[in-house]
Amino acid sequence: DAKTTQPNSMESNEEEPVHLPCNHSTISGTDYIHWYRQLPSQGPEYVIHGLTSNVNNRMASLAIAEDRKSSTLILHRATLRDAAVYYCILSLGGKLIFGQGTELSVKP
Amino acid sequence: NAGVTQTPKFRILKIGQSMTLQCAQDMNHNYMYWYRQDPGMGLKLIYYSVGAGITDKGEVPNGYNVSRSTTEDFPLRLELAAPSQTSVYFCASSPNRVDYTEAFFGQGTRLTVV
């Protein structure tokens, strides 16, 4: 399964945009890019996913590089409730294989 | 609409004991999954199922068994508990292959083997 690389941790300020990077240089043409987040003591929660084009939903935006070797999750205005571990995942064959994720902290 | 329900929430087992972690979903999803999460780590896929009667191994299946007799339920069985199975277990479901859609996770079962 293709692997992803994310920074271990990031900090942001409340009400500012946050850009969470993810590298996936071994991605294949049919791998989807998924983002999930996990709040403390909870199960993971779906954020967004895409294949080639940039995607927007009510939670976030996903920007995918043209060569698909990297992507960025964008939270437009961080709130304290966005503090969580964010996982960038490549899926193929109907399975989500999690990596270590990025722990995002949000300062008031 | 309860989503994915896991029981129990907490359990302490002695080495060598057996138990079944229950997972039920009320969304009529065909696909279901079991993950474990060790402290400070990401989730590891144990087993998954693409429909009633069909299961397959994930990344870390050793020491576990599953069955899927109905669409709603996907129990995970530990036959001979070992300290290495101390972890938080998450069940998830999705309406279609998870490549194309979102997965819904339960709140987890925290298991300690002593």
Image (tube, coloured by chain):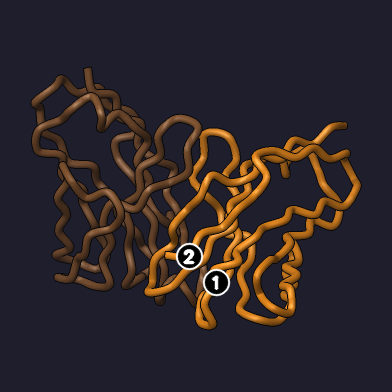
Q: Is residue A56 left or right of residue B6?
A: right
The Cα atoms of the two marked residues, 1 and 2, are separated by 6 Å
From the viewer's side, name the closer residue of A82 and B64: B64
Q: Chain of mark 1?
A: A
Residue occupying the point 17% across, 41% down: B20
Amino acid type, residue under disc 1 in the picture: Ile
Chain letter for the orange part: A
Query: Where's the N terminus of chain B, which quadrant?
Result: bottom left
Q: Position of residue B98 (x, y in %)?
A: 44, 70
Residue on which the image places disc 2: A2
Q: Is residue A65 left or right of residue B84?
A: right
Name the residue rendered at 73%, 60% in the picture: A73
Marking on residue B87: none
Question: Camera-side residue: B54 or A63?
Answer: A63
Q: Could you tell me which secondary element the residue under label 1 belongs to?
A: loop
Residue at 61% of width from left, 79% of height from top? A51
Q: Is residue B80 left or right of residue A17?
A: left
Q: Nearer the viewer, residue A65 or A39?
A: A65
Residue B71 to residue B47: above or below: below
Compared across the picture, whether A69 is left or right of A16 comes to left
Of callouts 1 and 2, which one flags the residue occurring earlier in the amino acid sequence?
2
